[in-house]
Amino acid sequence: MNSAPSKNRQAATMKIGEFARLLKVTPRTIRYYESLGLIRPSRRSDGGFRLYGREDHKLLLSIFALKKLGFSLEEIGKLAGNGRNGQKALQVFQALLVELKRWNEEISSKIARLSEVRDEIEKTTDLLENCPGCDDKVFDFECVECWENKGGIPLPLRVLTQFVAEGSSSGEDH
């Protein structure tokens, strides 16, 4: 019967080591987040130990969730700072909206770039999978001409063939 209140009291006031184990991080991580102003211990013990409670746990789980979404610790600190400066809810939400829109544009830009890279890799893969390979022929610029005749050389293949061609010619010089 007495174990439940003790457990609740323990959950409400954990030292940094216990708190870190609960969150599956190191105490150093918690101290680092503290140094960035992302979290503060709920209180300190008489001996000066950091003590963390349920609200600290919720806050760190929120920080981890934002990190998983791709926000940097600096961005998370900026978002958290908006609410800590005594601003009105509307101001906090407007600042959050600005950050989320900026983040969304950044993600969209990255997706577009990655999509272009994926398309080039798919073209290269298709070209190489359908290449007859010219038995017993050493790779040279005739291969490149063959690929160009089939619709152009995708960028990854163009770069790799140039690299291979330069590597083979430099080997002949020595």
Image (spheres, helix red, strand yellow):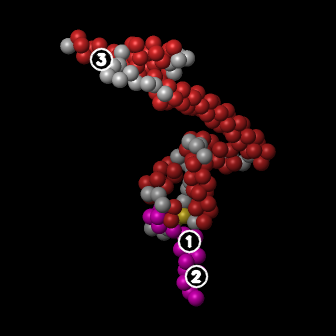
Quadrant into which the C terminus falls: top left
| Residue appearing at x 55%, y 17% in the figure | 151
Is 70 situated above or below 3? Answer: above
Q: Which label's residue is closer to the chain start, 1 or 2? A: 2
Q: Which label's residue is closer to the chain start, 3 or 1? A: 1
Give the magenta-colored segment's residue range.
Answer: 1-21
Residue 50 pos. (x, y %) = 49, 62
- Left or right: where does residue 30 sit relative to residue 71? left
Work out which residue is located at the far left of the displayed protein and give it: 174
Cα distance between the residues tagged 3 and 1: 66 Å
Cα distance between the residues tagged 2 and 3: 74 Å
Magenta: main secondary structure equals helix
Residue count near mark 2 (Cα–Cα under 10 Å), binned few <14, some 14–19, many ≥20: few
| Residue appearing at x 61%, y 60% in the figure | 58
The residue wearing badge 3 is 168
The residue wearing badge 1 is 11
| Residue appearing at x 65%, y 44% in the figure | 79
Residue 123 pos. (x, y %) = 54, 27
- Which amino acid does the dot numbered 3 rest on? Ser
The residue wearing badge 2 is 4
Toward the viewer: 66 or 143?
143
Toward the viewer: 37 or 164?
164
Q: Is residue 20 magenta?
A: yes
Q: How many marks?
A: 3
Residue count near mark 3 (Cα–Cα under 10 Å), binned few <14, some 14–19, many ≥20: few
